[in-house]
């Protein structure tokens, strides 16, 4: 049986995500993973990867299935939908999509937490959201740069 | 006579020159200084620059060769010194880290001596991967006697409490988590309140009347109320106080004493009910 390489990437992503420098700064590496994967998969596969990634994130965090599972499933779906409307093999396009979907993810998570009476106060939430979106987008920019270069060198060496 | 002179001109000239030389030689005693200054100085003035240039030109290849050799040696020496410098810097940095490690371990041991004998040292192995929660996982679990609601502290102050345990690991909910709350007391004025997590780095002191005496830089410690945290451990320092417009409420911002991101080790102390 062939194990998908994305599945092998997940432990690495979550190991890095749980390092203090990443976790305490609010960088969401699983989100970048879900967006980049969603841009190259159809709806069912993208949502499945989103669900799995979010579920692991929630299981490794406080509590069970929570905002990350639901939100990342939707992010996967969103990325898969957007791939039909953009030229995905561009660093800035991918970064922009990470930015947009990161805002969606944070706002949606906050609304879910609020609905569950577990949300922090609005001004604290704004700080958490904005820092997470900004830093995730910056890290996403770097990741996208390498992903695009790698894919060009592999699939289209003429433009690499 | 003229014919004689014409015939022997060369010989006579030689004799004349010799005679002049003899005269000069024999008269040097009487006017040595005068002769030396005029003739020698002129000669030296003409000759020495030539001598100097020739000597310089003759020595030039050797000098160039020596300079190249010296440059090569210098380069090697600089390389060697740079390497030595780097290795010394590395050694120094190792010494510094060892020193700080020793200091930190000393602090940990001092705190361990002050804590109840059941306190356990735990190593932090993972931080919370979610943006909205503040927790971390330690390498002690129920097999090591860790129970839910056990207070977790560091040498700086209170870190949080154990939220859930597995046989080998436990999850610690940090004071800064939005679900966290702890009863605190102002060390100076003895005013009590509840310190609440905000989900961000700073904490908030709530349930305090607007007229209570709490000022900036006051230290907030645990009051022991609530049945989770023992009394007297540092929670943080008041950094900001803002009154609401109607003057009924007050917002007090507290910066935790513990730098959660820099923690490596923590102490898990048994829940308060163990002592009861």
Image (tube, rainbow, N blue to C red):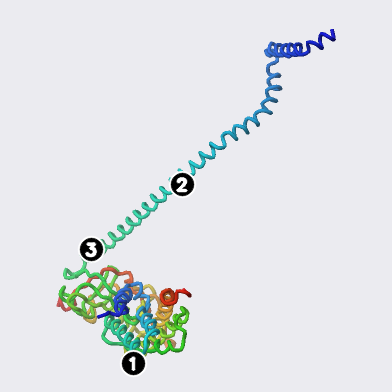
User: Which residue is depicted at the point 38% across and 78% down?
Assistant: B253
Q: Quadrant of the C terminus of chain B?
A: bottom left
Q: Secondary structure at mark 3?
A: helix
Whole-angstrom CA distance, mark 2 to mark 1, is 71 Å
Q: Position of residue B167 (x, y in %)?
A: 17, 77
Left/right placement of residue A128 relative to residue A14 reads right
Residue position marked by numbered label 3 in the rendering: B109
User: What subunit carries mark 2?
Assistant: B
Whole-angstrom CA distance, mark 3 to mark 2, is 50 Å
Residue under disc 2 on the same chain as residue under disc 1? no
Foreground: B132 or A157?
A157
Picture layout, residue B74 above or below residue B57: below
User: What subunit carries mark 3?
Assistant: B
Picture layout, residue A65 above or below residue B155: below
Image quadrant where residue B159 sits: bottom left
Foreground: B133 or A122?
B133
Q: Quadrant of the N terminus of chain B?
A: top right
Q: Secondary structure at mark 2?
A: helix
Give the number of the disc on residue B75: 2
Residue position marked by numbered label 1 in the rendering: A115
Q: Residue furthest right?
A: B2
User: Which residue is depicted at the point 38% across and 49% down?
Assistant: B84
Residue B141 seen in the current view: yes
Left/right placement of residue B52 relative to residue B144 reads right
Image quadrant where residue B73 sits: top left
Whole-angstrom CA distance, mark 1 to mark 3, is 45 Å
Q: Position of residue A24 (x, y in %)?
A: 35, 75
Q: Position of residue A153 (x, y in %)?
A: 43, 73
């Amino acid at each position: 049986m062939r194990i998908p390489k994305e599945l092998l990437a997940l432990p690495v992503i979550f190991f890095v995500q749980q390092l203090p420098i990443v976790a305490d700064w609010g960088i969401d590496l699983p989100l970048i993973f879900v967006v980049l994967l969603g841009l190259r998969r159809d709806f069912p596969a993208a949502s499945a990867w989103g669900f799995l990634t979010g579920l692991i994130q929630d299981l490794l965090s406080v509590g069970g299935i929570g905002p990350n599972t639901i939100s990342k499933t939707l992010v996967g779906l969103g990325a898969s939908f957007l791939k039909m409307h953009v030229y995905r093999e561009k660093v800035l396009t991918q970064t922009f999509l990470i930015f947009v979907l990161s805002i969606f993810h944070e706002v949606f998570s906050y609304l879910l937490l609020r609905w569950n009476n577990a949300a922090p106060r609005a001004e604290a939430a704004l700080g958490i959201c904005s820092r997470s979106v900004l830093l995730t987008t910056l890290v996403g920019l770097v990741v996208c740069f390498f992903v695009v270069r790698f894919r060009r060198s592999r699939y289209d060496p003429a433009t690499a | 006579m003229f014919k004689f002179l014409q015939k022997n001109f060369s010989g006579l000239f030689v004799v004349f020159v010799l005679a002049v030389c003899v005269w000069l030689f024999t008269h040097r005693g009487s006017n040595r200084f005068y002769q030396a200054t005029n003739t020698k100085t002129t000669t030296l003035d003409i000759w020495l620059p030539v001598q100097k240039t020739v000597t310089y030109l003759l020595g030039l290849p050797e000098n160039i060769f020596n300079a190249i050799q010296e440059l090569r040696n210098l380069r090697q020496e600089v390389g060697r010194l740079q390497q030595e410098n780097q290795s010394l810097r590395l050694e120094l940095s190792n010494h510094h880290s060892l020193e700080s490690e020793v200091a930190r371990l000393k602090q940990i041991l001092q705190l361990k001596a002050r804590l109840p004998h059941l306190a356990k040292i735990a190593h932090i192995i993972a931080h919370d991967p979610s943006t909205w929660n503040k927790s971390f996982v330690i390498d002690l679990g129920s097999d090591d006697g860790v129970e839910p609601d056990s207070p977790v502290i560091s040498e700086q102050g209170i870190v949080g409490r154990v939220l859930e345990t597995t046989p080998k690991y436990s999850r610690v909910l940090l004071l800064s988590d939005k679900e966290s709350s702890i009863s605190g007391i102002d060390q100076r004025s003895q005013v009590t309140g509840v310190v609440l997590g905000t989900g961000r780095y700073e904490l908030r002191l709530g349930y305090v009347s607007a007229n209570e005496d709490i000022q900036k830089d006051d230290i907030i410690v645990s009051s022991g109320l609530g049945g989770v945290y023992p009394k007297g451990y540092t929670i943080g320092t008041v950094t900001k106080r803002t009154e609401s417009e109607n003057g009924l409420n007050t917002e007090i911002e507290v910066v935790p004493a513990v730098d959660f991101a820099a923690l490596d080790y923590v102490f898990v102390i048994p829940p308060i009910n163990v002592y009861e």
